[in-house]
Amino acid sequence: MQLRLPDWSFDVPLLPWCIGLDWSGADPVIRSVSFLPLGQGSTNGAKGNAILLSSHPAYTLRGVGQRPVGIIEIVDAHRKGFFSVPATCRVIVVHTVPRKPIVRISGVHIYYPRFELDWAPAVGLLNPRGYLEFAAGLGESGRRSHPNLCERALARIGLSGSQAKRIIRATLIRRLSTLTDIQIVRQSLDVTGGDIRRAHSVGQAVWLTLLLNLSYFRSGPAVWVRLKNGRLLYFASGRFGERALLFNAAGRAVSAGAVGYADSRQWPWPMRLRNLEAMAIPFFSQTPPAWFQAKAR
């Protein structure tokens, strides 16, 4: 199935029961939804053979077990209702309300009965650089009311809070200026507590501590998938699913995602691996929209 937005289209694996769309604005964005049933010819954008649905969604909140069979619900993040299309369609076209400044998609959520796929730009805590800045207490996202892990460690060797912050900031700026996002992630997978104890300098110990904090994203096997045009797709397995990062040929993380399971205890690693191969890898290896990649710079 293909989902078409005004300036971006992507394929949805299998048949979900719900597709949630987040937008950069704060108001409802979807004006209407149309679809192309199976067996009909192709449609160019919003016209052609697509069948236009009602412009107004149903504002019925469903309880467990009340979802109709054979229906896919398209949910606008800023509405409490949904647009319904039949599960037999092969193309879904989302029509948005014209806005200035332009409102663009900022997140996609694909829901299946037992798991979900989430896709977003690799910014903030979804980016390895942004997460390290947060762990170091730097930047707006890293403001904290208590000392972070590195500050507490440096305090044990007699450094004041201001001295510790200067060391942490200088270390982080120096490392991030020379490493790509891929190199940061690879280093975080290799670091151990023993490496920190054997560090030859305070700056090295600080950097390894930050990397160890980043490696907390992963509590199981890591999966690397080589794609066309020099891109790499990375999955970090955790207790409740996998985190995904898509890297471009320059080693920069351009989009992020997650595979979440309704009951992770029922998904042992062999089943997760099959789900990655069948669903997550084809989904996250698609080219993200240009503004995802621009935001990730």
Image: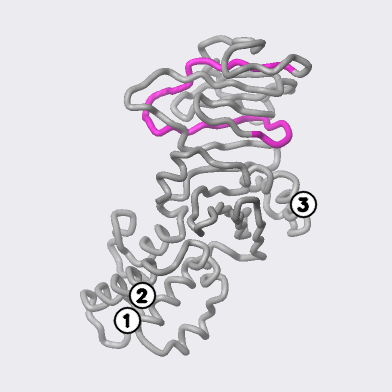
Q: Which residues are magenta?
A: 11-37
Q: Is residue 190 above or below residue 290?
A: below
Q: Is residue 238 visible?
A: no
Please identify, in this view, whether the residue under mark 3 or under mark 1 is nearer the observer: 3
Horizontal side of residue 290 vs 282, given as left or right: left
Mark 1 neighbour density, 10 Å: few (under 14) some (14–19) many (20 or more): many
Q: Quadrant of the N terminus?
A: top right
Residue shown at the point (50%, 84%) measured from the top left: 195
The residue wearing badge 1 is: 154
Amino acid type shown at disc 3: Arg
Amino acid type shown at disc 2: Cys
Amino acid type shown at disc 1: Leu
Horizontal side of residue 34 vs 41, given as left or right: left
Judging depth in this view, the residue of 156 and 84 nearest the camera is 84
The residue wearing badge 3 is: 274
Label 2's element? helix
For residue 150, the mark is 2
